[in-house]
Image: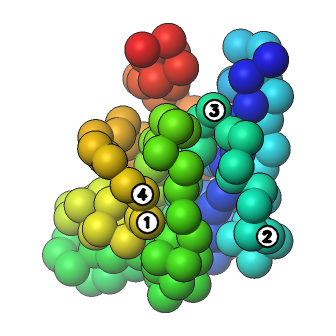
């Protein structure tokens, strides 16, 4: 059975809800899924993961200078993502994500090519578009 690990950083609970909805959808697709906040991550947890989904809330001014929170950036920079794993990024936001995904990707410590799908939610709910993105992510 394939394995997915979802690691998120949430401020108000919206990102946590979104991570859990992504996890539930992956489980419906027969993928063993583990969902945890960045502060519970321990070295080595990613080693046998087929899919790694990393998410956080959008910090910054309303429409410019979006970036991940410092806790998420620290986690992403110090954690080595296995080259064999497929990686996706997700974020929650109030108005726009702007440069959020570009700034998130810069933080992720991943060797090799790094072209990943991005998912976003304003309310923490998984949309139909997100489901299509996830299906493409796990089947390609």
Q: Is 21 or 36 nearer to us in this picture? A: 36
Asked if residue 19 lies left or right of residue 87, the reply is: right
What residue does disc 1 label? 109
The answer to which of marks 2 and 1 sits earlier in the sequence is 2
Neighbours of disc 4 within 10 Å: few (<14), some (14-19), many (20+)? some
Q: CA distance from mark 2 to mark 1?
A: 15 Å
The answer to which of marks 3 and 2 sits earlier in the sequence is 2
| Residue 82: x %, y % from top left | 55, 50
Neighbours of disc 2 within 10 Å: few (<14), some (14-19), many (20+)? few
Location of the C terminus by quadrant is: top left
The answer to which of marks 2 and 4 sits earlier in the sequence is 2
Say above or below: 74 vs 137. below
Which residue: 79% across, 70% down? 42
| Residue 57: x %, y % from top left | 50, 67
The answer to which of marks 4 and 3 sits earlier in the sequence is 3
Dividing the picture into quadrants, the one containing residue 109 is bottom left
Q: Secondary structure at mark 3?
A: loop
């Amino acid at each position: 059975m394939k394995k997915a690990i979802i690691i998120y950083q949430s401020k108000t609970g919206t990102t946590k809800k979104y991570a859990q909805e992504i996890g539930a959808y992956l489980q419906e697709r027969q993928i063993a899924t583990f969902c945890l906040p960045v502060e519970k991550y321990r070295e080595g947890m990613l080693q046998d993961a087929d899919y790694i989904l990393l998410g956080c809330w959008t910090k910054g001014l309303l429409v410019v200078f979006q970036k991940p929170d410092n806790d998420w950036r620290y986690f992403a920079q110090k954690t080595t993502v296995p080259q064999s794993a497929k990686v996706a990024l997700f974020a929650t936001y109030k108005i726009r994500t702007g440069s959020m995904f570009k700034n998130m990707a810069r933080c992720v410590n991943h060797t090799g090519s790094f072209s990943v799908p991005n998912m976003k939610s304003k309310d923490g709910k998984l949309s139909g578009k997100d489901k299509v993105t996830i299906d493409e992510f796990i089947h390609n």
